[in-house]
Image (tube, rainbow, N blue to C red):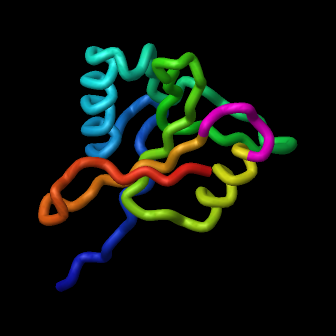
Amino acid sequence: MSKAMYALGRLKVGAMNKTEAAYDKHLALLQHAGEIQWRKFEGLKLRLADNTFYTPDFAVMAADGVMEAHEVKGFWQDDARAKIKIAADMYPFRFLAIKAKAKKDGGGWEMEAF
């Protein structure tokens, strides 16, 4: 008898997945080194339209005081990419998509600016 496969779904609001938790540790190191001033997981909720919001994974204040919205993704779904592009057009923040690099590729983080 085979088991049906189900999607894991979203975590509760305020709960980090493994990739987000690893990136939070990376941000903590940057904060300790003075490269960023502040970070907050799910610290912003941006209105894109009536009943349509975008909550970046991390709100970050860079060392120069510029506010950034960091979106951590393992892979992109079309609606998520559309939301970050719309938000980047509407709000005066620096929007970055963050993707973990494979260990075989040296590890670390790959960034894409919007």
Taking depth in this image into account, of 11 and 38 the one nearest to the observer is 38
Using the image, determine if residue 10 lies above or below residue 101. above
Taking depth in this image into account, of 6 and 106 the one nearest to the observer is 106
- Picture coordinates of residue 114 (x, y %)? 62, 51
Residue name at image x 50 percent, y 39 percent: 70
Using the image, determine if residue 47 lies above or below residue 39. below
Residue name at image x 18 percent, y 63 percent: 105
- Picture coordinates of residue 76 (x, y %)? 49, 63
Asked whether, in this view, residue 46 is left or right of residue 37, the answer is right
Residue name at image x 44 percent, y 37 percent: 12
93 part of magenta stretch: yes
Residue name at image x 42 percent, y 63 percent: 75
- Where is residue 77, by image quadrant? bottom right
Q: Residue furthest front?
A: 64
67 part of magenta stretch: no
Asked whether, in this view, residue 31 is left or right of residue 64, the answer is left
Using the image, determine if residue 88 lies above or below residue 77. above
- Picture coordinates of residue 72 (x, y %)? 43, 47
Q: Quadrant of the N terminus?
A: bottom left
Magenta span covers which residues?
89-94
- Picture coordinates of residue 51 (x, y %)? 80, 42
Asked whether, in this view, residue 101 is left or right of residue 14, the answer is left
